[in-house]
Amino acid sequence: MARERNSLGDVVVTGYGVLTAFGFGAEALRDGVFAGRPGFTPVSRFDTEPFHAKKAATYEGEGPEIPGVPVKPGYTPTQAEVLRACTAEALRMAGTDAPGAPVLIGTNGDHSASRSFWTDHAHERVPQDRRTLDSVPARLPHQLAEEFGLGTTRLAFVNACVASTNAIAHGAALIRRGTADTVVCGGAYLVTEDVFAKFDSGKALSREGVVRPFAAGRAGLLQGDGAAVLVLESARRAEARGAEALAEVAGWGMAADAYHVIKPHPRGEGLARAAGAALRTAGVAPERIGYVNAHGTGTPLNDVAETAALHRIFGADAPGVPVSSTKSSTGHMLEATGAVEAVICLLALREGLLPPTIGYQQADPDCDLDYVPGRARRADLTHVLSLNAAFGGVNAALVLKRTAA
Protein backbone atom coordinates (compact mmCIF):
# COMPACT_ATOMS: atom_id res chain seq x y z
CA MET A 1 0.00 0.00 0.00
CA ALA A 2 1.69 3.19 -1.18
CA ARG A 3 2.08 6.07 1.23
CA GLU A 4 1.86 9.72 0.25
CA ARG A 5 4.69 11.74 1.82
CA ASN A 6 7.04 14.58 1.12
CA SER A 7 10.57 15.37 2.18
CA LEU A 8 9.46 16.23 5.72
CA GLY A 9 8.03 12.73 6.23
CA ASP A 10 6.09 11.87 9.35
CA VAL A 11 3.69 14.08 11.31
CA VAL A 12 3.85 13.67 15.08
CA VAL A 13 1.97 14.94 18.13
CA THR A 14 4.32 16.59 20.62
CA GLY A 15 1.80 18.14 23.00
CA TYR A 16 -1.88 18.33 23.87
CA GLY A 17 -4.32 19.86 26.30
CA VAL A 18 -7.72 18.28 26.86
CA LEU A 19 -10.91 18.91 28.81
CA THR A 20 -13.97 16.71 29.32
CA ALA A 21 -16.69 16.52 31.93
CA PHE A 22 -14.18 14.63 34.10
CA GLY A 23 -11.84 17.61 34.27
CA PHE A 24 -8.67 18.86 32.66
CA GLY A 25 -5.82 16.70 31.39
CA ALA A 26 -4.95 13.07 30.75
CA GLU A 27 -5.48 11.96 34.33
CA ALA A 28 -9.11 13.03 34.12
CA LEU A 29 -9.53 10.84 31.01
CA ARG A 30 -7.96 7.90 32.83
CA ASP A 31 -10.26 8.35 35.82
CA GLY A 32 -13.34 8.80 33.65
CA VAL A 33 -13.21 7.34 30.15
CA PHE A 34 -10.72 4.53 30.74
CA ALA A 35 -12.25 3.69 34.11
CA GLY A 36 -15.63 3.22 32.43
CA ARG A 37 -17.48 5.97 34.27
CA PRO A 38 -20.39 7.88 32.70
CA GLY A 39 -20.06 11.64 32.92
CA PHE A 40 -23.78 12.42 32.73
CA THR A 41 -25.47 14.49 35.42
CA PRO A 42 -28.61 16.64 35.54
CA VAL A 43 -27.96 19.88 33.68
CA SER A 44 -27.73 22.85 36.02
CA ARG A 45 -26.39 25.61 33.75
CA PHE A 46 -29.84 26.19 32.24
CA ASP A 47 -33.42 25.17 32.95
CA THR A 48 -34.24 21.80 31.33
CA GLU A 49 -37.91 21.92 32.30
CA PRO A 50 -39.03 22.64 28.69
CA PHE A 51 -37.03 19.70 27.33
CA HIS A 52 -37.50 15.95 27.22
CA ALA A 53 -33.85 15.19 28.03
CA LYS A 54 -32.44 16.36 31.35
CA LYS A 55 -28.80 15.24 31.41
CA ALA A 56 -25.48 16.01 29.77
CA ALA A 57 -21.80 15.40 30.54
CA THR A 58 -20.93 18.90 31.72
CA TYR A 59 -17.85 20.02 33.62
CA GLU A 60 -18.98 21.39 36.96
CA GLY A 61 -15.63 21.86 38.68
CA GLU A 62 -15.21 18.26 39.80
CA GLY A 63 -11.93 16.58 38.91
CA PRO A 64 -8.74 18.34 37.77
CA GLU A 65 -9.34 22.07 37.41
CA ILE A 66 -8.98 24.06 34.20
CA PRO A 67 -5.83 26.18 34.63
CA GLY A 68 -6.74 29.83 34.90
CA VAL A 69 -10.48 29.20 34.97
CA PRO A 70 -12.00 29.28 38.47
CA VAL A 71 -15.15 27.22 37.94
CA LYS A 72 -17.65 27.92 40.70
CA PRO A 73 -21.37 27.31 41.17
CA GLY A 74 -23.38 29.22 38.60
CA TYR A 75 -20.42 29.86 36.30
CA THR A 76 -19.88 28.03 33.02
CA PRO A 77 -16.47 28.28 31.33
CA THR A 78 -16.40 29.78 27.85
CA GLN A 79 -14.92 28.21 24.74
CA ALA A 80 -12.30 30.95 24.66
CA GLU A 81 -11.23 30.08 28.21
CA VAL A 82 -10.98 26.34 27.69
CA LEU A 83 -9.23 26.72 24.32
CA ARG A 84 -6.73 29.08 25.94
CA ALA A 85 -6.04 26.57 28.72
CA CYS A 86 -5.73 23.65 26.30
CA THR A 87 -3.41 25.61 24.00
CA ALA A 88 -1.17 26.69 26.87
CA GLU A 89 -0.88 23.09 28.08
CA ALA A 90 -0.26 21.72 24.58
CA LEU A 91 2.55 24.23 23.96
CA ARG A 92 4.01 23.59 27.42
CA MET A 93 4.01 19.84 26.87
CA ALA A 94 5.52 20.24 23.41
CA GLY A 95 8.18 22.59 24.75
CA THR A 96 7.70 25.16 22.02
CA ASP A 97 6.17 28.57 21.48
CA ALA A 98 5.33 27.56 17.89
CA PRO A 99 5.84 31.00 16.35
CA GLY A 100 4.21 31.22 12.93
CA ALA A 101 2.20 28.02 13.42
CA PRO A 102 -1.21 27.89 11.70
CA VAL A 103 -4.14 27.73 14.14
CA LEU A 104 -6.93 25.38 13.05
CA ILE A 105 -9.92 25.01 15.37
CA GLY A 106 -13.15 23.07 15.04
CA THR A 107 -15.90 25.27 16.47
CA ASN A 108 -19.27 26.64 15.55
CA GLY A 109 -18.67 29.59 17.84
CA ASP A 110 -19.59 30.06 21.48
CA HIS A 111 -23.26 30.97 21.75
CA SER A 112 -23.41 31.04 25.53
CA ALA A 113 -24.29 34.74 25.43
CA SER A 114 -27.04 34.39 22.83
CA ARG A 115 -29.84 34.71 25.38
CA SER A 116 -28.54 38.03 26.71
CA PHE A 117 -27.97 39.24 23.14
CA TRP A 118 -31.59 38.68 22.13
CA THR A 119 -32.92 39.92 25.47
CA ASP A 120 -31.05 43.18 24.98
CA HIS A 121 -32.42 43.51 21.46
CA ALA A 122 -35.95 42.79 22.64
CA HIS A 123 -35.62 45.66 25.11
CA GLU A 124 -33.97 47.91 22.52
CA ARG A 125 -30.68 47.94 24.41
CA VAL A 126 -27.21 47.78 22.91
CA PRO A 127 -25.89 44.27 23.72
CA GLN A 128 -23.34 44.59 26.50
CA ASP A 129 -22.03 41.03 26.84
CA ARG A 130 -18.60 40.92 25.17
CA ARG A 131 -18.86 37.14 24.86
CA THR A 132 -21.37 37.66 22.06
CA LEU A 133 -18.42 38.27 19.72
CA ASP A 134 -17.25 34.71 20.37
CA SER A 135 -20.33 33.43 18.53
CA VAL A 136 -18.37 34.19 15.34
CA PRO A 137 -16.38 30.95 14.85
CA ALA A 138 -13.34 32.61 13.26
CA ARG A 139 -12.85 34.82 16.31
CA LEU A 140 -11.73 31.88 18.48
CA PRO A 141 -8.68 30.74 16.44
CA HIS A 142 -7.87 34.41 15.88
CA GLN A 143 -7.83 35.05 19.63
CA LEU A 144 -5.57 32.06 20.25
CA ALA A 145 -3.12 33.17 17.57
CA GLU A 146 -2.98 36.68 18.97
CA GLU A 147 -2.60 35.64 22.61
CA PHE A 148 0.11 33.04 21.99
CA GLY A 149 1.97 34.75 19.15
CA LEU A 150 1.13 32.04 16.63
CA GLY A 151 0.79 32.31 12.85
CA THR A 152 -1.44 34.35 10.60
CA THR A 153 -3.19 31.29 9.13
CA ARG A 154 -6.26 31.07 11.36
CA LEU A 155 -9.12 28.80 10.34
CA ALA A 156 -12.37 27.74 11.99
CA PHE A 157 -13.82 24.41 10.86
CA VAL A 158 -17.58 24.50 11.33
CA ASN A 159 -18.77 21.21 9.83
CA ALA A 160 -20.27 19.87 13.02
CA CYS A 161 -19.10 16.54 14.41
CA VAL A 162 -16.15 16.13 12.02
CA ALA A 163 -14.88 19.69 12.51
CA SER A 164 -11.87 19.05 14.73
CA THR A 165 -11.07 15.80 12.92
CA ASN A 166 -10.86 17.86 9.74
CA ALA A 167 -8.72 20.45 11.54
CA ILE A 168 -6.22 17.75 12.51
CA ALA A 169 -6.27 16.26 9.02
CA HIS A 170 -5.71 19.65 7.42
CA GLY A 171 -2.88 20.41 9.82
CA ALA A 172 -1.20 17.08 9.13
CA ALA A 173 -1.52 17.66 5.38
CA LEU A 174 0.08 21.11 5.70
CA ILE A 175 3.06 19.55 7.45
CA ARG A 176 3.44 16.60 5.13
CA ARG A 177 3.50 18.75 2.03
CA GLY A 178 5.95 21.21 3.58
CA THR A 179 3.67 24.23 3.96
CA ALA A 180 4.23 24.29 7.74
CA ASP A 181 6.49 22.49 10.18
CA THR A 182 4.27 23.07 13.24
CA VAL A 183 0.48 23.37 13.52
CA VAL A 184 -1.76 24.09 16.51
CA CYS A 185 -5.13 22.41 15.98
CA GLY A 186 -8.15 21.09 17.86
CA GLY A 187 -11.70 22.00 18.74
CA ALA A 188 -14.17 22.96 21.44
CA TYR A 189 -17.82 22.64 22.36
CA LEU A 190 -19.51 23.38 25.68
CA VAL A 191 -23.13 22.41 26.22
CA THR A 192 -25.36 25.43 25.67
CA GLU A 193 -29.11 25.80 25.87
CA ASP A 194 -29.67 26.67 22.21
CA VAL A 195 -27.88 23.63 20.79
CA PHE A 196 -29.31 21.36 23.49
CA ALA A 197 -32.80 22.58 22.54
CA LYS A 198 -32.25 21.82 18.86
CA PHE A 199 -31.11 18.26 19.49
CA ASP A 200 -33.91 17.73 22.00
CA SER A 201 -36.58 18.98 19.59
CA GLY A 202 -35.14 16.67 16.92
CA LYS A 203 -35.62 13.73 19.34
CA ALA A 204 -31.92 12.90 19.14
CA LEU A 205 -31.26 13.02 22.90
CA SER A 206 -31.67 10.07 25.24
CA ARG A 207 -34.53 10.72 27.61
CA GLU A 208 -33.37 7.99 29.98
CA GLY A 209 -30.15 9.84 30.80
CA VAL A 210 -27.72 7.17 29.57
CA VAL A 211 -26.10 6.43 26.21
CA ARG A 212 -25.95 2.83 24.98
CA PRO A 213 -23.85 2.71 21.80
CA PHE A 214 -24.30 -0.40 19.66
CA ALA A 215 -26.60 -2.03 22.24
CA ALA A 216 -30.19 -3.14 21.92
CA GLY A 217 -32.59 -0.52 23.25
CA ARG A 218 -30.29 2.42 22.61
CA ALA A 219 -32.37 5.57 22.67
CA GLY A 220 -30.16 8.43 21.54
CA LEU A 221 -27.13 10.51 22.35
CA LEU A 222 -26.34 12.95 25.13
CA GLN A 223 -24.16 16.02 24.76
CA GLY A 224 -20.93 16.70 26.60
CA ASP A 225 -18.41 19.43 27.28
CA GLY A 226 -15.15 18.93 25.46
CA ALA A 227 -12.08 20.70 24.17
CA ALA A 228 -8.68 19.56 22.96
CA VAL A 229 -5.74 21.27 21.30
CA LEU A 230 -2.83 19.34 19.80
CA VAL A 231 0.59 20.50 18.63
CA LEU A 232 1.53 18.71 15.40
CA GLU A 233 5.08 18.86 14.07
CA SER A 234 7.16 17.30 11.36
CA ALA A 235 9.11 14.44 12.87
CA ARG A 236 12.27 16.09 11.57
CA ARG A 237 11.62 19.30 13.51
CA ALA A 238 10.62 17.45 16.67
CA GLU A 239 13.76 15.31 16.55
CA ALA A 240 16.00 18.29 15.83
CA ARG A 241 14.86 20.11 18.96
CA GLY A 242 14.75 16.99 21.15
CA ALA A 243 10.99 16.89 21.59
CA GLU A 244 9.21 13.64 22.42
CA ALA A 245 6.89 12.33 19.72
CA LEU A 246 3.82 11.16 21.64
CA ALA A 247 2.18 9.54 18.61
CA GLU A 248 2.25 9.82 14.84
CA VAL A 249 -0.70 11.11 12.84
CA ALA A 250 -0.06 8.57 10.12
CA GLY A 251 -3.15 8.91 7.96
CA TRP A 252 -6.36 10.82 7.42
CA GLY A 253 -9.31 10.70 5.09
CA MET A 254 -12.59 12.47 4.36
CA ALA A 255 -15.63 11.46 2.32
CA ALA A 256 -19.26 12.43 1.79
CA ASP A 257 -22.33 10.20 1.59
CA ALA A 258 -24.57 12.63 -0.31
CA TYR A 259 -27.34 10.36 0.96
CA HIS A 260 -29.52 12.37 3.36
CA VAL A 261 -29.35 15.66 5.22
CA ILE A 262 -29.35 13.87 8.59
CA LYS A 263 -29.37 10.09 8.18
CA PRO A 264 -26.10 8.23 7.55
CA HIS A 265 -25.85 5.95 4.54
CA PRO A 266 -27.33 2.67 5.83
CA ARG A 267 -24.33 0.69 4.55
CA GLY A 268 -21.83 3.18 5.90
CA GLU A 269 -20.36 3.82 2.48
CA GLY A 270 -19.01 7.33 3.16
CA LEU A 271 -17.48 6.35 6.48
CA ALA A 272 -15.84 3.33 4.88
CA ARG A 273 -14.41 5.53 2.11
CA ALA A 274 -13.00 7.99 4.66
CA ALA A 275 -11.37 5.15 6.57
CA GLY A 276 -10.00 3.67 3.34
CA ALA A 277 -8.45 7.02 2.45
CA ALA A 278 -6.88 7.29 5.91
CA LEU A 279 -5.39 3.81 5.61
CA ARG A 280 -3.99 4.59 2.17
CA THR A 281 -2.46 7.85 3.36
CA ALA A 282 -0.89 5.98 6.26
CA GLY A 283 0.31 3.12 4.04
CA VAL A 284 -1.30 0.72 6.49
CA ALA A 285 -3.26 -2.43 5.68
CA PRO A 286 -6.53 -2.86 7.63
CA GLU A 287 -5.16 -5.85 9.53
CA ARG A 288 -2.62 -3.56 11.24
CA ILE A 289 -5.40 -1.69 13.05
CA GLY A 290 -5.66 -2.94 16.62
CA TYR A 291 -8.48 -0.72 17.84
CA VAL A 292 -11.21 1.53 16.45
CA ASN A 293 -12.55 4.52 18.36
CA ALA A 294 -16.00 4.60 16.77
CA HIS A 295 -18.24 7.60 16.28
CA GLY A 296 -20.79 5.51 18.20
CA THR A 297 -23.50 8.02 19.05
CA GLY A 298 -25.95 5.52 20.55
CA THR A 299 -28.65 6.34 18.01
CA PRO A 300 -30.55 3.56 16.22
CA LEU A 301 -29.43 4.52 12.70
CA ASN A 302 -25.84 5.64 13.26
CA ASP A 303 -24.65 2.54 15.07
CA VAL A 304 -26.00 0.10 12.49
CA ALA A 305 -24.51 2.14 9.64
CA GLU A 306 -21.15 2.37 11.39
CA THR A 307 -21.12 -1.37 12.04
CA ALA A 308 -21.77 -1.91 8.33
CA ALA A 309 -18.90 0.46 7.51
CA LEU A 310 -16.56 -1.50 9.78
CA HIS A 311 -17.51 -4.71 8.01
CA ARG A 312 -16.66 -3.01 4.71
CA ILE A 313 -13.32 -1.82 6.06
CA PHE A 314 -12.15 -5.03 7.72
CA GLY A 315 -14.04 -7.70 5.79
CA ALA A 316 -13.88 -11.14 7.37
CA ASP A 317 -11.56 -9.81 10.09
CA ALA A 318 -14.13 -7.32 11.41
CA PRO A 319 -15.39 -9.47 14.33
CA GLY A 320 -11.86 -9.65 15.74
CA VAL A 321 -11.19 -5.89 15.79
CA PRO A 322 -11.99 -4.20 19.12
CA VAL A 323 -14.30 -1.19 18.70
CA SER A 324 -15.57 1.14 21.38
CA SER A 325 -17.55 4.34 21.71
CA THR A 326 -16.16 6.69 24.32
CA LYS A 327 -19.19 8.92 23.82
CA SER A 328 -20.89 6.51 26.21
CA SER A 329 -18.73 8.21 28.84
CA THR A 330 -17.94 11.74 27.59
CA GLY A 331 -21.14 12.42 25.72
CA HIS A 332 -21.13 13.83 22.20
CA MET A 333 -18.88 16.87 22.13
CA LEU A 334 -19.91 17.96 18.62
CA GLU A 335 -17.13 20.09 17.06
CA ALA A 336 -14.65 19.00 19.76
CA THR A 337 -15.32 15.30 19.31
CA GLY A 338 -12.55 14.36 16.89
CA ALA A 339 -9.82 16.21 18.78
CA VAL A 340 -10.76 14.79 22.19
CA GLU A 341 -11.05 11.30 20.75
CA ALA A 342 -7.65 11.70 19.06
CA VAL A 343 -6.18 12.30 22.53
CA ILE A 344 -8.03 9.24 23.83
CA CYS A 345 -6.53 7.20 20.98
CA LEU A 346 -3.09 8.59 21.76
CA LEU A 347 -3.42 7.43 25.37
CA ALA A 348 -4.70 4.03 24.24
CA LEU A 349 -1.59 3.62 22.07
CA ARG A 350 0.86 4.74 24.74
CA GLU A 351 -0.69 2.82 27.62
CA GLY A 352 -1.84 -0.30 25.79
CA LEU A 353 -5.36 0.08 27.10
CA LEU A 354 -8.65 0.02 25.21
CA PRO A 355 -11.33 2.35 26.62
CA PRO A 356 -14.66 0.57 27.08
CA THR A 357 -18.15 1.11 25.74
CA ILE A 358 -20.32 1.58 28.79
CA GLY A 359 -24.10 1.32 29.02
CA TYR A 360 -23.86 -1.82 26.88
CA GLN A 361 -26.21 -4.40 28.38
CA GLN A 362 -27.88 -6.37 25.60
CA ALA A 363 -26.52 -7.14 22.15
CA ASP A 364 -28.26 -5.92 19.00
CA PRO A 365 -28.11 -8.51 16.19
CA ASP A 366 -27.51 -5.67 13.70
CA CYS A 367 -24.43 -4.57 15.68
CA ASP A 368 -22.32 -7.72 15.78
CA LEU A 369 -18.76 -6.62 16.58
CA ASP A 370 -16.51 -6.57 19.64
CA TYR A 371 -17.50 -3.34 21.38
CA VAL A 372 -15.26 -3.73 24.49
CA PRO A 373 -18.30 -3.64 26.77
CA GLY A 374 -18.16 -2.40 30.32
CA ARG A 375 -14.46 -2.51 31.21
CA ALA A 376 -11.16 -1.38 29.71
CA ARG A 377 -8.99 -4.07 28.15
CA ARG A 378 -5.24 -4.45 27.78
CA ALA A 379 -3.90 -4.65 24.23
CA ASP A 380 -0.56 -4.29 22.46
CA LEU A 381 -1.36 -1.59 19.90
CA THR A 382 0.67 -0.14 17.06
CA HIS A 383 -2.08 1.54 15.00
CA VAL A 384 -5.55 2.81 15.87
CA LEU A 385 -8.36 4.19 13.74
CA SER A 386 -10.64 7.02 14.87
CA LEU A 387 -13.92 7.60 13.03
CA ASN A 388 -16.30 10.55 13.01
CA ALA A 389 -19.43 11.42 11.05
CA ALA A 390 -21.80 14.37 10.95
CA PHE A 391 -25.11 15.62 9.65
CA GLY A 392 -25.06 16.24 5.93
CA GLY A 393 -23.28 12.96 5.24
CA VAL A 394 -19.74 14.09 5.97
CA ASN A 395 -17.27 11.55 7.32
CA ALA A 396 -13.68 11.69 8.55
CA ALA A 397 -11.05 9.27 9.80
CA LEU A 398 -7.61 9.41 11.40
CA VAL A 399 -4.97 6.71 11.75
CA LEU A 400 -2.64 7.18 14.72
CA LYS A 401 0.56 5.17 15.12
CA ARG A 402 2.52 4.41 18.26
CA THR A 403 5.96 5.94 18.48
CA ALA A 404 8.96 4.64 20.39
CA ALA A 405 8.77 5.46 24.07
Image (spheres, rainbow, N blue to C red):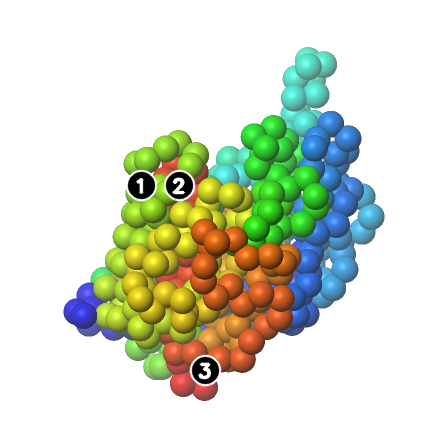
**Place of residue 230 in the rendered image (x, y in percent of width and height, measured from the top left):** 47, 63
Q: Label 3, label 2: how many angstroms apart (C-alpha)?
A: 32 Å
**Place of residue 132 in the rendered image (x, y in percent of width and height, measured from the top left):** 61, 33
**Place of residue 385 in the rendered image (x, y in percent of width and height, measured from the top left):** 39, 65
| Sequence-earlier tag: 3 or 1 | 1
Q: Is residue 354 left or right of residue 169?
A: right
Q: Label 3, label 1: how many angstroms apart (C-alpha)?
A: 33 Å
Tell me which residue sits at (63%, 58%) in the image.
Answer: 361
Residue type beneath disc 3? Asp
Q: Secondary structure at mark 1?
A: loop
Decide which of 277, 340 is in the foreground and name it.
277
Q: Residue furthest left?
A: 2
Decide which of 282, 108 is in the foreground and name it.
282
Do the residues under discs 1 and 2 have CB atoms within 8 angstroms? yes
Q: Secondary structure at mark 3?
A: loop
Q: Which residue is mark 1?
A: 257
Q: Residue furthest bottom?
A: 405
| Sequence-earlier tag: 3 or 2 | 2
Q: Secondary structure at mark 2?
A: loop
Decide which of 253, 154 is in the foreground and name it.
253
Tell me which residue sits at (68%, 58%) in the image.
Answer: 38
Q: Is residue 29 left or right of residue 176?
A: right
Q: What quarter of the picture does the C terminus occupy?
A: bottom left
Q: Which residue is mark 3?
A: 380
Do the residues under discs 3 and 1 have CB atoms within 8 angstroms? no
